[in-house]
Image (cartoon, rainbow, N blue to C red):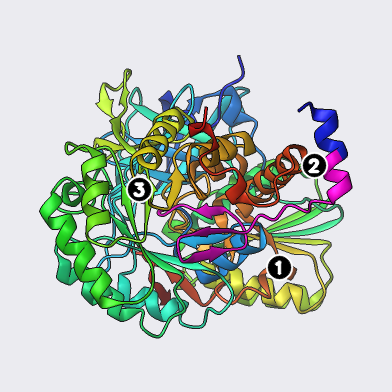
């Protein structure tokens, strides 16, 4: 069918596209979410992001105790695109953070959690009992902090115990955020699904570094960090496609999305929602509204009424 | 090719000027930084030590820029101890700038908060009537007084100093002087940078009398580009929405003048 026919049909049926999406049991009005680690420590900022078009915000990864993170430099802008960060999971701790978002009734908040043992996650989920939480996202993939994140994600037995314990601690949906570590990420996904996970976020940043040639030193204080932004988009897209081809699990795509075309690619690969972070560094908060508008225009052009009409279409060919 | 302001550029320190026993100005060559607007800042990498947000200082020589630093914590002490010939990394400029009004202007600087005020002075018109207030703890810590006077040679102007211990200029806090001046006459623009309580009081004094006032805020900053979120004040991000905010806007911000966030992001009272 050609474009002219499409547009005639859509005017005939008056298809009004909706940006609403569901990730399993999680319902969102809009598919673009703030990724974890970005702008995530103030409820006022969450409200602002929501007004700007974010369907949900994921908090910074919270730990059982407050963490200061690494000294600066914690971020590096890569020539050719992308960022390498090693902020070091700085966060106010789950207990303090829960108090901060207790009054929230408006913003869909996904609470990201990071820990070393199942009991850490059980304790943290308990702190949010009085908060309106849309979902929890287990950080199994931060590539630059010892004993948590990727080091946990690389241990299938630990993943199994953490997911099982977390699922037993709450009725709120639980998402596992996976990344590229030493264990094949598809094995981590498989273990998480077997343990009852509700959805998968793929992927996290990719372990990387930068060295200054004049001073001949690694730039980041932690030496290693996580690469994000446009350079990792094709990798993240491949992972989403692979997961959706192999497993029947709702997926949130994450990695290098900065335009509506990027977002649509992730839908076509099998993602039901998308997280972004680095694009905010380049295009500031307006990026949510701009991408939403682009997706809507695309849906009108293609005569799709909902996001789910697009999800996984690339696998059909 | 135009430089991407997010990329780190290595510059060599060409001159170190002792301003006070604890304050130094480091001069370097960089066209981009020599042209920044007042209120803008750079992220300054001290190799092997840390990275700090710094207001960019003017230099009288074309193509030169400078940072004025007070030694305080490990990072600022690291920058303070940089010698001529050593290299630092810079990225930026970041942030917005002051909206400079015409007419009768009041500039208030506390400590190294004077830096953006000096930068602002290089943009005033010869017809502007400018009063500069310098706040310091003691006589030893007063700097840029002569510099301010020389910058304002062609203007009707006053440069007034207050010291907490009264060892030089007026005794007391610089905000007492602000209160007195804004009570006595109307200013077309009031500009302030320094410790937050000082800025809060200055904003209150001027805004409550209907004067246009702007403050350049300082917060814990990690990325400088609006990603890490460390520098949020209410729903504002100092690095992207500021550093300069209007008194009108600040008067409705629940955190300004009352709370700051520590390195873990926990709100703490001033």
Q: Position of residue B195 (x, y in %)?
A: 50, 65
Q: Is residue A92 above or below residue A90?
A: below
**What chain letter is assigned to the residue under label 3?**
B
Q: Is residue A21 magenta?
A: yes
Q: Residues within 10 Å of mark 3 (few under 14, many from 20)?
A: some
Q: Position of residue B29 (x, y in %)?
A: 51, 23
Q: Is residue A51 above or below residue B118?
A: below
- Residue range of the region highlighted in magenta in the rendering: A9-37
**A21 or A87: nearer the viewer:** A21
**Disc 1 element:** helix
Q: Is residue A306 above or below residue B172?
A: above
Which picture quadrant has residue A19? bottom right
Which residue has dot 1 on it?
B249
- Residue B168 seen in the figure: no
Q: Is residue A206 left or right of residue A292?
A: left
Q: How many marks?
A: 3
Q: Is residue A132 magenta?
A: no
Are discs 1 and 3 located on one and the same chain?
yes
Which picture quadrant has residue B186? bottom right
Dot placed on the residue nearer the N-terminal end, 1 or 2: 2
């Amino acid at each position: 069918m050609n474009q002219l026919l499409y547009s005639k049909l859509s005017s005939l049926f008056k298809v009004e596209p909706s940006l609403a999406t569901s990730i399993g049991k999680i319902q969102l009005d809009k598919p673009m979410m703030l990724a974890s680690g970005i702008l995530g420590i103030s409820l006022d900022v969450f409200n602002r992001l929501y007004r700007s078009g974010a369907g949900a915000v994921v908090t910074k990864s919270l730990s059982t105790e407050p963490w200061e993170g690494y000294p600066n430099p914690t971020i590096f802008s890569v020539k050719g695109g992308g960022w390498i960060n090693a902020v070091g999971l700085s966060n106010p701790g789950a207990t303090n953070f829960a108090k901060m978002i207790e009054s929230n009734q408006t913003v869909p908040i996904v609470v990201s959690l990071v820990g070393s043992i199942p009991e850490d996650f059980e304790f943290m989920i308990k702190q949010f009992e009085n908060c309106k939480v849309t979902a929890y996202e287990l950080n199994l993939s931060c590539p630059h902090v010892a004993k948590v994140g990727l080091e946990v994600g690389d241990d299938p037995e630990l993943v199994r115990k953490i997911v099982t314990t977390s699922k037993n601690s709450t009725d709120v949906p639980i998402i596992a955020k996976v990344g590229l570590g030493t264990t094949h990420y598809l094995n981590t996904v498989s273990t998480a699904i077997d343990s009852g996970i509700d959805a998968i976020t793929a992927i996290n940043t990719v372990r990387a570094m930068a060295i200054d040639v004049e001073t001949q030193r690694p730039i980041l204080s932690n030496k290693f960090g996580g690469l994000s932004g446009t350079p990792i988009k094709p990798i993240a897209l491949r992972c989403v496609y692979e997961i959706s081809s192999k497993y029947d699990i709702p997926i949130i795509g994450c990695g290098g999305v900065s335009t509506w075309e990027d977002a649509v690619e992730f839908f076509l690969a099998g993602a039901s929602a998308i997280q972004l972070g680095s694009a905010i560094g380049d295009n500031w908060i307006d990026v949510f509204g701009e991408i939403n508008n682009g997706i809507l225009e695309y849906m009108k052009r293609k005569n799709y009424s909902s996001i789910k009409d697009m999800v996984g279409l690339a696998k059909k060919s | 090719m135009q430089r991407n302001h997010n990329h780190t550029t290595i510059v060599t320190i060409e001159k170190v000027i002792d301003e006070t026993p604890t304050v130094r100005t480091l001069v370097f060559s960089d066209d981009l930084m020599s042209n920044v607007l007042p209120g803008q800042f750079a992220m300054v990498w001290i190799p092997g030590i840390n990275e700090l947000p710094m207001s960019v200082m003017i230099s009288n020589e074309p193509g030169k820029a400078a940072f004025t630093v007070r030694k305080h914590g490990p990072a600022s002490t690291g920058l303070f101890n940089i010698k001529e010939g050593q290299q630092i990394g810079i990225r930026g400029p970041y942030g917005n700038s002051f909206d400079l009004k015409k007419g009768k202007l009041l500039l208030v600087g506390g400590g190294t908060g004077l830096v953006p005020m000096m930068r602002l002075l290089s943009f005033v018109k010869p017809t502007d009537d400018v009063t500069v207030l310098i706040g310091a703890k003691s006589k030893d810590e007063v700097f840029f007084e002569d510099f301010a006077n020389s910058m304002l040679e062609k203007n009707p102007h006053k440069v007034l100093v207050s010291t907490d211990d009264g060892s030089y200029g007026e005794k007391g806090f610089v905000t007492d002087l602000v209160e007195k001046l804004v009570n006595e006459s109307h200013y077309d623009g009031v500009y302030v940078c320094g410790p937050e309580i000082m800025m809060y009081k200055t904003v209150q004094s001027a805004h409550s009398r209907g004067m246009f006032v702007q403050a350049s805020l300082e917060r814990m900053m990690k990325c400088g580009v609006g990603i890490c979120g460390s520098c949020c004040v209410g729903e504002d991000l100092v690095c992207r929405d500021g550093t300069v905010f209007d008194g009108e806007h600040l008067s409705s911000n629940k955190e300004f003048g009352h709370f700051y966030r520590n390195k873990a992001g926990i709100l703490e009272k001033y």
